Amino acid sequence: MTDLLDNAIEAYRHTFGEEPTVVASAPGRINLIGEHTDYNEGLVLPAAIDRRVYVAAGTRSDQQVLIFSNSYNTIVTTTLDALGSRQREGWASYPKGVLSLVQERGCKLTGLNLLISSSVPEKAGLSSSAALEVATALAVLELFQFPMDPTQLARLCQKAENEFVGVSCGAMDQFAAVFGKKGYALFLDCRSLHSEFVPFPEGVLLLVCDTGVKRELGSTEYGRRQEECRQAVEELARYLPGIRSLRDVDVAAFLQHENLLDPTLRKRARHVVSENTRVRAAVEDLKKNDLDDFSKLIYQSHLSLKRDYEVSSRELDAVVDIAASTDGVIGARMTGAGFGGSAICFVMEENFGELKFNLEEMYPRITGRQPQLYICEIDDGAKVEWRR
Ligand code: GLA
């Protein structure tokens, strides 16, 4: 039994005075490449990481729902009837949204207790929210023995975030949390939802550097980018009839029509169109273990996010620059929505020490902040960890 599982069971016992009936867990994620493409029905290549949210659950004999968070050391109390409320309630909105949607799908809930214990850093761009949603959903479905296909489960969790938290995220994070597989990245087509596992290269370590700049995804910029992409599609559709999203625009068509777009929309569209191409190429590179080409794509992706999509930050750029000047680093880029959060570095095992040293030395000098470094392993997606 892992320490985290033990902790979750122990904390449940301590909080609710009895053993939980089930414990489920779901991972945070990094995204190798394919940023801001999911809500454009595009291509992404995320991977689940070995930082997980554990949710322990048990039924109650009344109509109450009690949710305890280890991270916040607070308990939120509600009732089954009140779960449908879309009022924003901080961290509790995630599990409440999931419970409400599970109920809506026909799962008959009784009162219940939930205990949340997490090792996914929050607001670091590692999708602690999707991990919480997915772990909650899986725990509750297992508790009430209500079957649900994994794609539906990921979709339900995305809907919970859209409607109950008010963040209009795409599907990437929830799919990574559900479908992740140890040692593999998940190549996901966000239109067809077709996915394929792609091996993560051997001998390469994944170093996550949390810039220490917290970002709120709900902040206006994420929504603004979505709106700009919609506008770019609207403009381009005048010349490319039948396109539904930027996914439908290939590089040749974009180059032919880019001058017809307003300069900001042109930059946004250029990022999305080129990023989809990079994801396809990166998948081929990983299959062939062509790390030279993979490296170029990773840096190009970051540059495109910085210059065209304008979602990077001084701190994220500093991490990428430091990594790029270190021997044995294959690539580095921001991961997730941007505006802070984390950057990822792919580094040869033997050069890890040098990269760590450089980041710890140089990052504070450039930014005045301390970096948080995590070596992450690519882990499995959500699972039921324990049943009484
Ligand atoms: C956040 C969202 C995802 C995705 C990324 C950017 O992580 O939750 O759906 O849009 O930003 O790629």
Image (tube, rainbow, N blue to C red):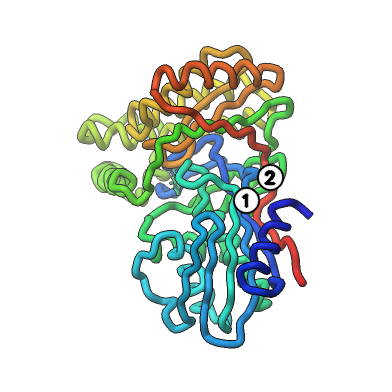
The reply to whether discs 1 and 2 touch (Cβ–Cβ < 8 Å) is: yes
Residue at 47%, 28% (x, y): give it.
370
Instruction: Classify the position of the C terminus by image quarter.
Output: bottom right
The x, y position of residue 10, in whole percent, is: 69, 62
Q: Residues within 10 Å of mark 2 (few under 14, many from 20)?
A: many
- Which structural element holds mark 2? loop
Q: Earlier in the sequence, mark 1 or mark 2?
A: 1
Q: From the Cβ of disc 1, is ligand 1 less than 8 Å away?
A: no
Q: Residue furthest right?
A: 1
Residue at point 63% right, 66% down?
Answer: 138
Q: Nearer the viewer, residue 39 or 99?
A: 99
Q: Position of residue 300 (x, y in %)?
A: 46, 24
Vertical relation: 185 (above or below) 388: above
Numbered circle sitting on residue 379: 2
Q: Is residue 212 left or right of residue 115?
A: left
Q: Which residue is mark 1?
A: 52
**Left or right of 133 in this view: 273:** left
Q: Which quadrant does the N terminus fall into?
A: bottom right
Amino acid tagged 1: Arg
Q: Residue furthest bottom?
A: 62
Cβ of mark 2 under 8 Å from ligand 1: the answer is: no
Which residue shows up at 32% across the image and 32% down it? 310
Give the class, few, some or many, for how many residues have Cα within 10 Å of label 1's Cα (few <14, many ≥20): many
Residue 276, percent from left and from top: 47, 37
